[in-house]
Amino acid sequence: MKDSVTIYRCGDGVGVSSGPLLPHTGILQVFRMLQLSSVTLSNQTAPSGLTRLSGVAFPGEKEVQEWEKEQEEARRRDHRRIGMSEYRRRGFSEVVTPTLYSTALWERSGHWEHYSENMFTVATEGSQRYALKPMNCPAHCVMFEQRVRSWRELPLRWADFGALHRNELSGALGGLTRVRRFCQDDAHIFCTPEQLEQEIVSCLEFIRSVYRVFGFSFHCLLSTRPTPCLGEPEQWDDAEQQLKRGLQQFGERWELNPGDGAFYGPKIDVQIRDALGRQHQCATIQLDFQLPIRFQLQYVGSDGVLHRPVMIHRAVLGSVERMIAILAENYGGRWPLWLSPAQVSVVPVGGSSEAYGQQVVQRFQEAGFMVDLNDDPGATLNKKIRWAQLAQYNYIFVVGDKERDGGSVNVRSRGGKQLGRRPTEEVLKDLMKLRDSRSNEEDF
């Protein structure tokens, strides 16, 4: 019965569990400790002095080796680790900066003068004012100036995935494409003038590698000196020429966008085209002459003299929320397996196969898949399948007595295609391969 519980005894202890349980502990021969944590008793705030030990147990060495192999594979494929390793491979260090700053920082950076009406301020005791950060660059400048820097340290590449807040006009807001609070894959690079061209090419190659995964075509716009602008004309001319050489070396299509640069430096805007042919501006590579001057950033060159570093603002996805909106519309809600938040729905034929269905769910969850069990007792099999299709699950696993007895699942694709009964482990390996290929295909 669904509401039943089991009373068990282990040594002198008696407990209640919903299972599953083993007939006796003698079956277990190999143990692995996972975690230690303190225990707080109900309705008590003081430490109890008790410690909780969490672990797993196995019948023998063969089973524990298989489990350890699966855990290592899951860690290797973890999306958080993959993303961080990609940044490390490209020489970036991930940093975390505060969300709230004194307005003195924004006055120093110049943002308070030009951007304060778009910032959320916070009232505090006394005369001190604070504001939620709309960008990360001033904080990274503060990090750079904390000590004397050497030319040997450059380029310094810092990635910051913090939340940003911008007080946009209500009429400019729209869905996820324009919001007041968003996350951005922000990064800043501090380099020497001689390193600038290669850093631009590296940023462009990073952008291309990401957009290829999504299947987006793109082109670049080189936005040059506006009127008015800050900085010397010779400085602008040299920076624009380096950006132009970087684009030529990159090899993708680009065009000139005269006079549309920021007042503090030229930039490269990357425009993507989605499946509907619509253009979106997401990635950007922006040079900044002014912040290194305002913060008096310097490094000791190979000649022993102090020099001013070049600062590059860089975003690949831009606003993560906006990119999610673009992808959702691009895929029409039919997310490919590797991106999907609803990858597999396991549908038991009847109550007798629910326990096996739960085993299948657990097996795929351990491999990092988003899996749900549809055990609604009031729904027919066809209704469960139809619901999973409408919910855009990539795959539907129907499990009954035959599947339970044979250690298999009956697979259907999101479009209703019957892929047949297959061994569960075989399906798991095939879906892992499909997921890791980042393909849009559904058949495997």
Image (tube, grey):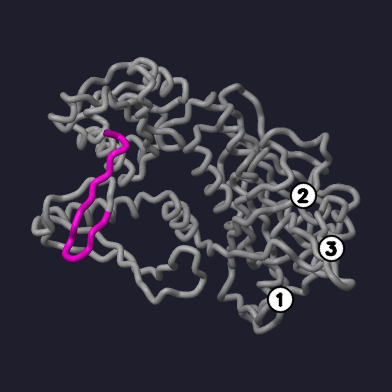
- The disc, 1 or 3, on the residue closer to the chain's N-terminal end is 3
Q: Where is residue 434 in the image (x, y as percent from the top left)?
A: 33, 35
Mark 2 or mark 3: which comes first in sequence?
Answer: 3
Of residues 380 and 202, the one nearer the viewer is 380
Q: List the residue tagged with mark 3.
A: 123
Which of 288/444 is in front? 444
Kindly indicate the quadrant of the structure image that contains residue 139. Answer: bottom right
Query: Residue 345, percent across and down?
Result: 36, 30
**Position of 247 relative to 62 (above/below):** above
Residue mark closest to the camera, 1 vs 3:
3
Looking at the rendered image, the quarter that the N terminus falls into is top left
The residue at the point 83 percent across, 67 percent down is 124
Camera-nearest residue between 72 and 120: 120
In the picture of the structure, the residue carrying the numbered disc 2 is 166
Give the mark nearest the N terminus, 1 or 2. 2
Write down the residue under mark 1.
298
Q: Which amino acid type is shown beneath numbered disc 2?
A: Arg
Dot 1 amino acid type = Gln
